[in-house]
Image (spheres, grey):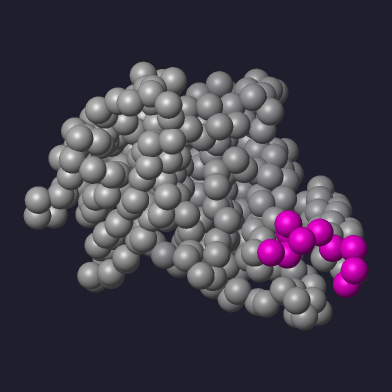
């Protein structure tokens, strides 16, 4: 591919879209709505809700999330309209008069739309930053202004543009493409949501991505897997568009490379998506196991915890926690084995007693105390 040809196509596409009233009206309306939201939520010094201000990164997060949903919808119209618009307005003569391959043409078109939308996101973030600086009780988390466009905006746009291009080539009908994609967006927003652990939410609207300047993201690995899935799928659909675009006949070598890129990127996206899904499924299976274990011992005799002395030592990235617990049987019934009251059922309760501590029986992550040997014991988690 010739980078100069790609740059020329991208520049021409950006200029053409920027001059269209459709995009200008959309951009102005989106920025005005964002300005109103920021004024209502963050503008005043007395009535701003603490839930939005408690985590400083919420300010850019909310703005990027809103503009992302709006862009995902508008991108469907722009992406599925580019072939028809080019023929109707006769805007391809400048491009077709030059020796530009299908790959350079499609990649240039994609970059042109991406640059325009990313510019709109940067304008929204600049307005957000002004509100952030005005509010003295909400510090500026600079990395959040970088993370959210990279993790939310770019994967969403690449996926929806690639999918729109591919479906336009597949159906060869703009109306059918609009109907299918807008239906998919509606299902994503109102029905799919957190189904399949949020795997179908390509806009990351329901993906937990709150960033804390203290601990960062809650689970950065799962977030990266989710966003990488849609970035790879979108790239694969772009390769498919290059391969099946009915514009110029290409040599067998380029056809094979584009087909390989299509299959390779889509397969990689599905593989990464499977990693994301399996990670959540394993956590859900553990939770069900803990719940089942807890239900098995509901109603059993419990002993009251009189005192619990925890000593925590940090060793690199691990913690050594020693618990010195004193328990007491305040029931009228005598029994040999009992469960400590208020025992948390979780993976941290697995451990071994040091020395000749009081014997107890491990049951997955639940333990019972043998009361024949006394009521004081120590256990290292």
Left or right of 46 on screen, residue 53 = left
Picture mark count? 0
Say which residue appears at 23% left-offset and 43% top-offset: 374
Residue 372 x %, y %: 20, 35
Nearer the observer, 244 or 369: 369
- Left or right, 182 with reference to 364: right
Please tell me whether residue 220 is drawn above or below residue 315 in the rendered image. above
In percent of width and height, residue 198 lies at 51, 35
* Residue shown at the point (62%, 43%) measured from the top left: 205
Specify the quadrant that holds the N terminus.
Answer: bottom left
Residue 158 % position (x, y): 51, 48
Task: Label the magenta part by its dominant secondary structure.
Answer: loop
The answer to whether residue 380 shows anywhere in this view is yes
Q: Nearer the viewer, residue 40 or 375?
A: 375
Q: Which residues are magenta?
A: 45-54
The answer to if 52 sits in the magenta stretch is yes
Q: Residue furthest front?
A: 332
Locate residue 22, reporting x and y percent: 81, 48
On whether residue 47 falls in the magenta region, the answer is yes
Q: Which of the 4 image quarters holds residue 183?
A: top right
Residue pictured at 60% horizontal, 69% vertical: 145
Q: Give whichever of 205, 92 is nearer the camera.
A: 205
326 lies above or below 347: below
Residue at figure coordinates x 90%, y 63% from the top left: 47
- Quick check: can you spot residue 239? no
Where, by quadrant of the figure, is residue 19 drawn?
A: bottom right
């Amino acid at each position: 591919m010739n980078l100069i040809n790609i740059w020329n196509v991208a520049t021409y596409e950006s200029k053409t879209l920027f001059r269209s009233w459709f995009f200008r009206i959309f951009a102005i309306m989106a920025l005005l709505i964002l300005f109103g939201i920021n004024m209502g939520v963050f503008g005043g010094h007395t009535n701003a809700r603490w839930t939005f201000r408690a985590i400083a990164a919420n300010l850019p997060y909310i703005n990027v999330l809103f503009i992302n949903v709006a862009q995902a919808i508008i991108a469907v119209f722009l992406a599925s309209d580019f072939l028809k618009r080019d023929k109707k307005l006769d805007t391809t003569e400048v491009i077709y008069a030059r020796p530009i391959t299908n790959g350079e043409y499609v990649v240039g078109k994609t970059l042109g739309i991406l640059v325009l939308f990313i510019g709109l996101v940067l304008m929204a973030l600049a307005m957000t930053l002004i509100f952030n600086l005005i509010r003295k009780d909400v510090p500026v988390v600079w990395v959040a202004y970088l993370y959210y466009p990279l993790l939310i905006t770019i994967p969403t746009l690449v996926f929806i543009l690639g999918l729109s291009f591919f479906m336009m080539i597949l159906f060869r009908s703009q109306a059918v493409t609009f109907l299918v994609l807008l239906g998919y967006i509606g299902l994503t927003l109102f029905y799919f949501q957190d189904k399949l652990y949020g795997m179908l939410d390509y806009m990351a609207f329901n993906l937990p991505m709150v960033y804390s300047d203290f601990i960062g993201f809650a689970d950065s690995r799962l977030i990266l897997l989710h966003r990488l899935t849609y970035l790879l799928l979108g790239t694969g659909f772009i390769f498919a568009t290059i391969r099946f675009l009915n514009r110029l006949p290409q040599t067998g070598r380029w056809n094979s490379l584009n087909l390989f890129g299509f299959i390779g990127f889509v397969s990689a996206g599905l593989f990464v998506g499977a990693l994301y899904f399996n990670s959540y499924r394993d956590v859900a299976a553990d939770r069900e196991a803990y719940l089942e274990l807890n239900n098995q011992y509901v109603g059993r005799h419990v002993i009251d915890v009189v005192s619990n002395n925890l000593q925590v030592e940090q060793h690199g990235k691990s913690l050594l926690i020693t618990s010195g617990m004193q328990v007491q049987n305040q029931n009228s019934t005598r029994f040999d084995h009992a469960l400590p009251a208020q025992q948390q059922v979780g993976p941290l309760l697995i451990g071994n007693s040091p020395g000749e501590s009081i014997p107890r029986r491990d049951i997955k992550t639940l333990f019972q105390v043998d009361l024949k040997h006394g009521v004081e014991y120590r256990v290292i988690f």
